[in-house]
Amino acid sequence: MSDALKQSVGRYGIWSVGLRSEDPSLRSELADSAAELEELGFGAVWLGGSSAARHAVPLVEATSRLTVGTSIQSIWQYEAAESAAGFADLEASHPGRFVLGLGVSHAKIADQYRRPYSALVAYLDALDEAGVPADRRVLAALGPRSLELARDRSAGSVPYLVTAEQTARAREILGESPLLAPELKVILETDPTRARAVARGTLAMYLALPNYTNNFLRNGFTEEDLKDGGSDRLVDAVFAWGDDSTIRSRIEDFLTAGADHVALQVLDNGSRDTLPREAWHRLAALLA
């Protein structure tokens, strides 16, 4: 069944925090943005932050085929029963349009963080009992055990803040069938100094989270790479920046490494929280 999900999301999607807003005054703009992304040819929208099914509703209602997923919904913030109910409501009104992306978040963010792997297994057990099908949920898996869990208990993995090399290793663990849809940050800037400054401004908060730094260290980076906002080597591995040809090539690196789909997060003037609609047009044009 992962093949159906792969077909629905296509090769390219948009990862966005701004599209998950619950501000009623923005509902029309969110709907317009989703319709625009569908028209631009993106197959999926991934809602950043600890999003939930309710955040997907205005986007699904405004489009006819766009897949909307959470990337991710924290298992600590939402009980499994609540997640299952939200999934069921959207499935009843718009069958096949929503994907439940789950993750364990971080100890520095979730106060109740404890035995995250065991907690995730228990959460999946509860979703099974509630009738949420495994082929309509994905996991934000980074390490080998989590990737194996994604392979065995979900439709695949939506890893965040990874490199093409990490994507290749993830594909080896997942095997051929599961969806592998890494997130990749895009900066539409050709000047190296400006591009890397924007990148480091975004990367700083993630370098304080051991789940990410440990994953970098597992995959060939050193403590030196993690200092001072990240080395050029690290920045250039987890961000796509440069001219159109260079950005397109960096995105292609992830597909060549084994990704089925790349969730592109456009950093417009360094912000994750806006709706960079002009930049989305530019990105769609360079991918065309």
Image (cartoon, grey):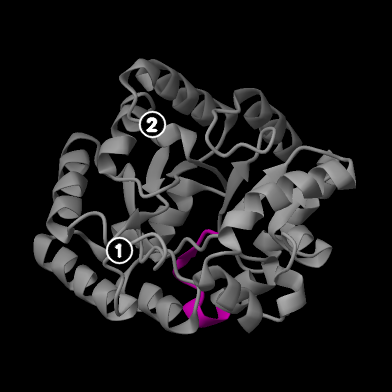
Circle nearer the N terminus (1, 2): 2
Percent x, y for residue 32?
45, 19
Q: Residue at x 19, y 34 (%)?
A: 93
Q: From where the camera sits, is residue 92 visible?
A: yes
Percent x, y for residue 269?
70, 33
**Which structural element holds mark 2?**
loop
Q: Residue at x 36, y 50 (%)?
A: 50
Q: Residue at x 68, y 67 (%)?
A: 164
Q: Is residue 15 left or right of residue 169?
A: left
Q: Are the residues flagged by discs 1 and 2 in contact, CB closer than 8 Å?
A: no
In the image, which residues are magenta?
Answer: 172-182
Amino acid type at mark 2 = Ser
Percent x, y for residue 257?
67, 68
Q: Quadrant of residue 258?
A: bottom right
Q: Quadrant of residue 19?
A: top left
Q: Residue at x 45, y 46 (%)?
A: 48
**Which structural element holds mark 1?**
loop
Q: Quadrant of residue 65?
A: top left
Compare residues 134 and 161 and report the one nearer the observer: 161
Amino acid type at mark 1 = Asp
Q: Is residue 99 left or right of residue 11?
A: left
Residue 181 in the magenta stretch? The answer is yes
Residue 126, compared with residue 266, is above or below; it is below
Give the residue at mark 1.
111
Compare residues 266 and 147 and report the one nearer the observer: 266
Give the residue at mark 2.
21
- Alpha carbon of mark 1 to alpha carbon of mark 2: how far? 23 Å
